[in-house]
Amino acid sequence: DSGVTQTPKHLITATGQRVTLRCSPRSGDLSVYWYQQSLDQGLQFLIQYYNGEERAKGNILERFSAQQFPDLHSELNLSSLELGDSALYFCASSVAAGAIQETQYFGPGTRLLVL
Amino acid sequence: SQKIEQNSEALNIQEGKTATLTCNYTNYSPAYLQWYRQDPGRGPVFLLLIRENEKEKRKERLKVTFDTTLKQSLFHITASQPADSATYLCALAINEKLTFGTGTRLTIIP
């Protein structure tokens, strides 16, 4: 158990809908990262928040947005969902801001299926 | 553009032998490289980090090498066991973001 929690574990929804994925980092970790993993694309970095502020951005679509709250939990919002958004979404956390020299602790993931 | 390649999609090794996985990268000079293990349907788990000025790092039965001239990292599991069967991912920090390779699915055959 990494100490990172994600809810829900599974999510099934329809195209065009909007969903929110939630992540609670490990106690004491200030950085939260979001990743998307699909069979054809592998593990792709989406976005990082550090202590409530956006820190780094990856290949995140404009239909997707995220935020980190004062209690450090984070939410990833996915809107106007398409079939291709079906994937595993992982949240990870680390103590500080730098991905370069820090271990990232991954949550169990949310499996999203868009029908 | 940045490219990270892991030697093969799948690797089958006999129990007790050494498994060697390869991570090659182009167009970048990372200061650090990390290796993660991922089991089906679960999040990646950090294994080892190696810095550019370190040639080799060990942790129990695991060994990682980092050759910045060849732009390659090798990941070894000695005395492999069926419980080592998983997908192994290498990851490089590129522009302050962790970029993952596509992974190698390792199967240890009893």
Image (tube, coloured by chain):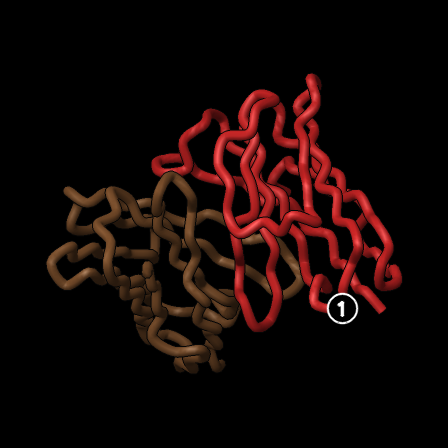
Chain colours: A red, B brown
Q: Residue at x 64, y 31 (%)?
A: A25
Is B86 situated above or below A106? Answer: below
Spot occupied by residue A28 in the image (x, y as percentages of width and height): 57, 21
Considering every residue shown, the one lying at the far top of the view is A70
Q: Quadrant of residue A81?
A: bottom right
Give me the chain letter of mark 1: A
Is A4 situated above or below B81? Answer: above
Q: Which image quarter holds the N terminus of chain B?
A: bottom left
Q: Which residue is mark 1?
A: A83
The reply to whether residue A93 is in sight is yes
Q: Nearer the viewer, residue B106 or A54?
A: A54
Spot occupied by residue B69 in the image (x, y as percentages of width and height): 11, 58
Residue type indicated by callout 1: Leu
Q: Residue at x 54, y 40 (%)?
A: A105
Q: Nearer the viewer, residue B53 or A60?
A: A60
Spot occupied by residue B93 in the image (x, y as percentages of width and height): 35, 45
Q: Residue at x 81, y 64 (%)?
A: A114
The reply to whether residue A28 is in sight is no
Which element carries disc 1, helix, strand or loop? helix
| Relative horizontal placement of residue B22, taking residue B107 as reference (left or right) | left
Disc 1: CA contacts within 10 A as few (<14), some (14-19) or many (>=20): few
Spot occupied by residue A49 in the image (x, y as percentages of width and height): 56, 31
Counting every numbered tag in the picture gives 1
Q: Nearer the viewer, residue A109 or A81?
A: A81
Is B17 situated above or below A65? Answer: below
